[in-house]
Image (spheres, rainbow, N blue to C red):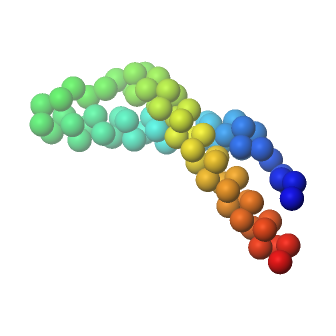
Amino acid sequence: MTRQGWSTTKIAVALYPFGAGAAAVNVFFASLIFSWIGGPVLPTGLSVLTGAIVGVPATWYFARHIRHLMDVADKRAEV
């Protein structure tokens, strides 16, 4: 069986802006929650930079999951 559709890399590149944005928002909100116990609130720019870095592996693993779901769907369609 050959794989049909997009590769994992292509899916990851297409979804990266969303993954990095979600990671940046989560990092910022985590710093707000951390501030309740005396931690610093991260500036927006640092949250965006951290989100861009954390977004790479998060998006890659999500793209692998989507590719797996596509493979499962293709396998079921053949049966």
Residue furthest toward the front? Answer: 1
Q: Is residue 50 above or below residue 3?
A: above
- Give the image location of residue 18, x and y in percent: 59, 41
Q: Quadrant of the C terminus?
A: bottom right
Rendered image quadrant of residue 71: bottom right
Marker count (numbered):
0
Q: Is residue 19 something that shows in the picture?
A: no
Q: Is residue 52 above or below residue 8?
A: above
Question: Farthest residue in the bottom direction?
Answer: 79
Q: Residue at x 37, y 36 (%)?
A: 27
Q: Position of residue 14 (x, y in %)?
A: 71, 40
Residue 54 drawn at (x, y percent): 47, 32
**Residue placed most toward the observer, 10 or 41:** 10
In the orientation shown, which residue stands out farthest toward the left? 37
- Which residue is pictured at 47% across the width and 23% down the height? 49
Q: In the rendered image, which quarter is residue 46 located in?
A: top left
> Looking at this view, is 64 or 16 the one in front?
64
In percent of the image, x 67 and y 40: which residue is there?
12
Residue 22 falls left or right of residue 6: left
- Residue 67 can be seen in this image: yes
Q: Is residue 55 left or right of residue 16?
A: left
**Placement of the N terminus among the 4 image quadrants:** bottom right
Rendering coords of residue 21 (x, y %): 52, 37
Q: Residue at x 82, y 73 (%)?
A: 77
